[in-house]
Amino acid sequence: MTESIEELELKKGRLVAEISEVERELANRRGIPLTTKALKDSRAYAFDAYSPISERLEGCVNSLARYGFCVVDNVIPRDQICDLKQEAEKAEKLVEKNSRQVVNGLKEGKSLDELAKTPGIELRPVRRVGYSPKIVNDIVWLPKYAKFLAHPSITSIARAVLDDHLKIAQLHLRHIAAASEDGDPGGFFGMGRSDLRDWHTDWPHDLMSYGAGNPQTNVGSVRQPFPDVTLGLTMIWFLTDVDEDSGATYVVPGSHRDLRNPRGPNDGMSVTSPVSGDMQVTAKAGSVFIQDSRLWHASPMHNTGQKRIAVVNRWSPWWIAVDDYAPGGVVNTVCRPLSQGEYDALPEDLKPMMRHLCPTEKDTLQQLALDKAEAAKKQAFWGFDLLDSHPEKVASANKHIEVKIRAD
């Protein structure tokens, strides 16, 4: 090449732009929506839980990579939704009562250890040595829902995107109030304005980390700019239908791969203002909305329809630290613990993903991760076996392997 560095830089820019145009044209010809309107109209992010597994898995993985989210419809059978909805509404009252008693007790000067011994207050020991007990995991109030949490249509997606060994790092109710009898609209935070948002990304990509500058309540987060890899999946299990008028989550498709962040100190964004291209994700009761934790999203501030009933959980690979680094994080939902008896009562297929929440239960790697480690061992031993069986081939056995140093 005889071009100068400046000419090569210009050429590179033209080629990058051309490749981008070709990729968009390929997507267009394949019928892949690349605009918010097309995505909303087609609902191309949604797949049925009982469609062929290869179609569902590939579709959800691709949707998560391209848009940052997907929906799996019909995970919970229609004839069981009513029971789970009633269970969740009852649990909401129990969770609120328990949290209120803990907070009030602390205001009265009692310690968490003292409150843990108080009848009617549900606190549990945590795994981290020297840390105070914490509010019990919401799953104890949701035994019917627990039977669906490890649904194979959901765990297969999580394993494909995250890792073979999974942890459910957070689980909590997330209901959104309906309009009141006097006509005032409901909504998250009770703001009641359809033009408001609360843009954020979820833990472990929550830059405020629940505690901002307070070491007692900050649980830690991935620093900006986020690496281009999925480190967490947030799932919302809808027990009511959600649409633009009744609790549908706002998202900005593709924002999970944008280096900016709504709460980024140097990104100049208003978390309460709409973003061009945002949309609400609609789904029927029994569906599960799954999003990359880097995706910009917001709970609706305005709800004129029915109350939204939902359960939220956040899934992580085993190598993400899900220990609670906030010794004063009394009410945050990170790794809310379970007693041994509560853990033992979980469905068998759910136990491996919640084992880390029970301090008296030894947490070991899950079988799929062990199987792959065993396969790696066999491959390693093959090289040594080759040395014994065909020493003359060892020097040339990797002739087909070449690694080129990347120029970018």
Image (cartoon, helix red, strand yellow):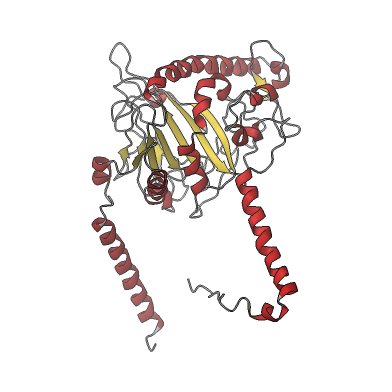
Between 215 and 33, the residue placed more toward the observer is 33
- Is residue 374 positioned above or below 94 on the image? below
**Residue 50: where, in percent of width, then height?**
38, 36
Between 243 and 227, the residue placed more toward the observer is 243
**Residue 288: where, in percent of width, then height?**
41, 34
Say whether residue 352 is left or right of residue 35. right
Outermost residue on the front side: it is 389
Q: Is residue 110 visible?
A: no
Say whether residue 242 is left or right of residue 313. left
Q: Is residue 374 visible?
A: yes
Q: Quadrant of residue 76?
A: top left
Q: Residue at x 38, y 79 (%)?
A: 8
Q: Quadrant of residue 18?
A: bottom left
**Residue 325: where, in percent of width, then height?**
65, 38
Between 30 and 282, the residue placed more toward the observer is 30
- Is residue 382 positioned above or below 192 on the image? below
Between 57 and 14, the residue placed more toward the observer is 57
Q: Quadrant of residue 216?
A: top right
How many badges with numbers are in the image?
A: 0
Q: Residue at x 39, y 50 (%)?
A: 62
Q: Residue at x 68, y 10 (%)?
A: 119
Outermost residue on the bottom side: it is 2
Q: Quadrant of the N terminus?
A: bottom left
Say whether residue 347 is left or right of residue 86. right
**Residue 178: where, in percent of width, then height?**
34, 19
